[in-house]
Image (spheres, grey):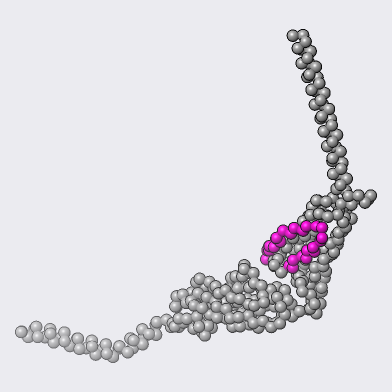
Amino acid sequence: MNNRAFGVLFLLHFYYRLEMIILRQLLPFITLTLFATLPFTTQALTLEDLINSNLLTIETKVQKQTAQIVGQQLTFTIEVATNRWFAKGTQLKAFELADTIILANSGIIINGTKNINGQTWSNQIHEITLYPTRSGEYTLPSIDVHISVNTENNAVVEGVITTTEQAFTISLAPALVNLEQFIVSANVSLVIESSLENEQHYALGEAITQTITISAEGTPAMMIPPLETQALTGISIYQKPAQVFDKSNRGELLGTRIETITYILEQAGDYIIPEQIIYWWNISDSVLEEIIIPKSSWSVGVNNTGESATNNNNASLTKIQLKRLLVISTLLIFSSVILFILYRYKAHFL
């Protein structure tokens, strides 16, 4: 190897050694610089982590009235809020609460936003309406809520959070203590459609139909008590299955119960259906009111002379039938005589 080649190799080796020395000295500084420039991330991989980091909240409230009574509508809410947004929303697992009526379609979901410490959060509120059927203490059970949140640095985080139990009390107004059935509503209406006329005389075999419609605001139809049907000797009573249905008008529930009763008059006599009282607790005025279905009275098969109206009708019909039969028979005989005379007259001249 000549001197020139040796010199080139020496210079290459020298530069290599120099670069290695410089890298060793600068490596810690370069590493620190790289980490300093990387964004800081929180490892919130579960819903519990988000709650503990104040990035997710869940709250249950029972929104009852000051003096919540038996049969009165009660609403509770479950609110879930996040500082980001929901990926798949929130769903409640079905639950049961003894001594209450929970309508199948009573759940309402409200989407919105709220301001927390100057920051806009997304929230979903579940409203569940129920109707307690007894007075006393209640405990709303823990409810599983499936939550799916789109986080900033951990994509979608989802799972199930269980709410805490909530206790509440239902009372009973003193005026209602001795009543077995009553309606709790702000407004109750009664409509009666009937072919029955008071003090009217009816014939045996006639049918009288009465349709009674009761509607109550803010009360499901299934909580409107059925009417009492009194048995009457000499009259057959046929009652259709009650029509029970709910309607929603601008978010306000209206329950309706329709009962249709038909009376078949089978024996002569005087009959009375006593009045019925429907008790209604007016929650607007906190007072007990009465809705009256008036008394009905009528007579069957007896006219002013004391004779059976039906027998008279039957007798009249029989006389008319006999007259018609006599006229028809006379016409037939007369026609036969004329035909016979014409036949003999024709035979004589032939």
Image location (x, y in percent) of residue 75: 66, 74
User: Quadrant of the image for the N terminus?
Assistant: bottom left
Q: Does the magenta stretch include residue 237?
A: yes
Q: Is residue 299 magenta?
A: no
Q: Is residue 115 left or right of residue 39?
A: right
Residue 294 shows in the view: no
Return the residue nearer the eye: 35 or 154. 154
Q: In this view, does 336 lie to the left or right of 81?
A: right
The answer to whether 91 is drawn above or below residue 338 in the figure is below
The answer to whether 231 is drawn above or below residue 44 in the figure is above
Return the residue nearer the eye: 227 or 99. 227
What's the residue at 16%, 84% (across, down)? 12
Residue placed farthest to the left in the image? 1
Number of callouts in the render? 0
Image location (x, y in percent) of residue 313: 86, 44
Return the residue nearer the eye: 233 or 90. 233
What's the residue at 77%, 65% (across, down)? 227
Q: Residue 251 occupies which quadrant of the picture?
A: bottom right
The answer to whether 319 is drawn above or below residue 228 in the figure is above
Image location (x, y in percent) of residue 100: 67, 75
Residue placed farthest to the right in the image? 305
What's the residue at 12%, 85% (across, down)? 9
Q: Residue 236 occupies which quadrant of the picture?
A: bottom right
Residue placed farthest to the top in the image? 349
Residue 107 shows in the view: yes
What's the residue at 58%, 81% (across, down)? 142
Return the residue nearer the eye: 248 or 257. 257
**Which residues fall within the magenta stretch?**
224-251
User: Quadrant of the image for the C terminus?
Assistant: top right
Q: Residue 20 occupies which quadrant of the picture?
A: bottom left
